[in-house]
Amino acid sequence: LKDIEFIRSNYYNKLEIARFDSNLGRYVGYTEFGVKQAEYFNNIPSYIGAMRAQRETYCQHNIGVY
């Protein structure tokens, strides 16, 4: 599970604006709007906790499939 990474990207108009990276444990913004969104999401502890848990919940469950 250490080498598996969960990434959730947010797109608008085919442009990636923000991304959650399980290795970093937080959102990172790539545009002006994305930076604001990343700050907003990073300041919600329950949401960030749920995103961090997705690596174990989603990725570990599907290891055998791929």
Image (tube, helix red, strand yellow):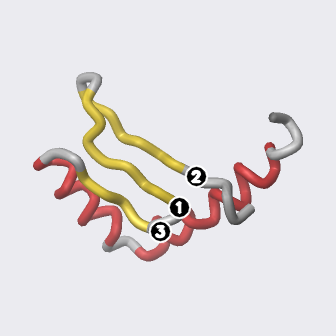
| Residue on which the image places disc 3 | 25
Task: Tell which circle, 2 or 3, labels the residue nearer the N-terminal end.
Answer: 2
Relative image position of residue 9 (x, y in whole percent)? 41, 42
* Badge 1 vs badge 3, beta-carbon distance below 8 Å: yes
On residue 22, the disc is 1
Task: Tell which circle, 2 or 1, labels the residue nearer the N-terminal end.
Answer: 2
Q: Which amino acid does label 1 sit on?
A: Ser
| Residue on which the image places disc 2 | 6
Q: Outermost residue, right direction?
A: 64
* Badge 2 vs badge 1, beta-carbon distance below 8 Å: yes
Mark 1–mark 3 distance (CA, rounded to whole Å): 5 Å
The residue at the point 17 percent across, 57 percent down is: 36
Mark 2–mark 1 distance (CA, rounded to whole Å): 5 Å
Pick the residue in front: 63 or 37: 63
Q: Is residue 11 placed above or below 8 in the rendered structure?
A: above
Label 3: which secondary element: loop
Q: Which amino acid does label 2 sit on?
A: Phe
The residue at the point 63 percent across, 65 percent down is: 53
